[in-house]
Image (cartoon, rainbow, N blue to C red):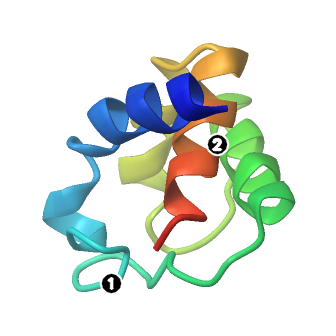
Amino acid sequence: MVEDVASGGQLYSTCVGCHGANGEGGVGPKLAGQAKADLVSKMKQYKAGEEVGPMSAMMIPQAQQLSQAEIEAVAQYITTF
C-alpha cells in the first residue's frame, strides 16, 4: 500500500494543474474527500472513452494512458488528501 501511494503520487503530478496539489480543485473538480471506489470508477469510465462530465474530452486521453494498477495507485494517493 505504501508503494501504491508513492507511485500514485508520481502519477498525480500530471493532475495538479487542474485538480490542485492537494485535490482542492481549480480548473477541474475537487478530488479530496472522494472515495477510492468512486475515483476508480470514474477513471475506468474515462479510460473506456465514456462521457462522464464536462471535462471528459480532457480526461479521456489522460485515463487511457493508465493501466488498471496505475488507476488504483493514483486513486489511493488521492484518498490521502
Q: Which is more toward the observer, 47 or 76?
A: 76
Q: Work out whether mark 2 precedes mark 1 in sequence or the reverse, and give the earlier one.
A: 1
In the depicted structure, whether residue 64 falls above or below residue 9: above
Residue for badge 1: 25
Q: Position of residue 81 (x, y in %)?
A: 46, 74
Q: Amino acid at mark 1?
A: Gly
Give the number of callouts. Answer: 2
Foreground disc of the pair 2, 1:
1
Q: Position of residue 7 (x, y in %)?
A: 42, 25
Q: At 52% from the left edge and 41% from the top edge, which residue is drawn?
A: 74
Residue most extreme to the front: 2
Q: Residues within 10 Å of mark 1 (few under 14, many from 20)?
A: some
Residue for badge 2: 46
Left or right, 59 with reference to 1:
left
Q: Quadrant of residue 13?
A: top left
In the depicted structure, whether residue 52 falls above or below residue 20: above
Left or right, 59 with reference to 75:
left
> Which image quarter holds the N terminus?
top right
The secondary element bearing badge 1 is classed as loop
The secondary element bearing badge 2 is classed as helix
Q: Residues within 10 Å of mark 2 (few under 14, many from 20)?
A: many
Q: Position of residue 64 (x, y in %)?
A: 53, 23
Q: Which is more toward the observer, 57 or 2?
A: 2
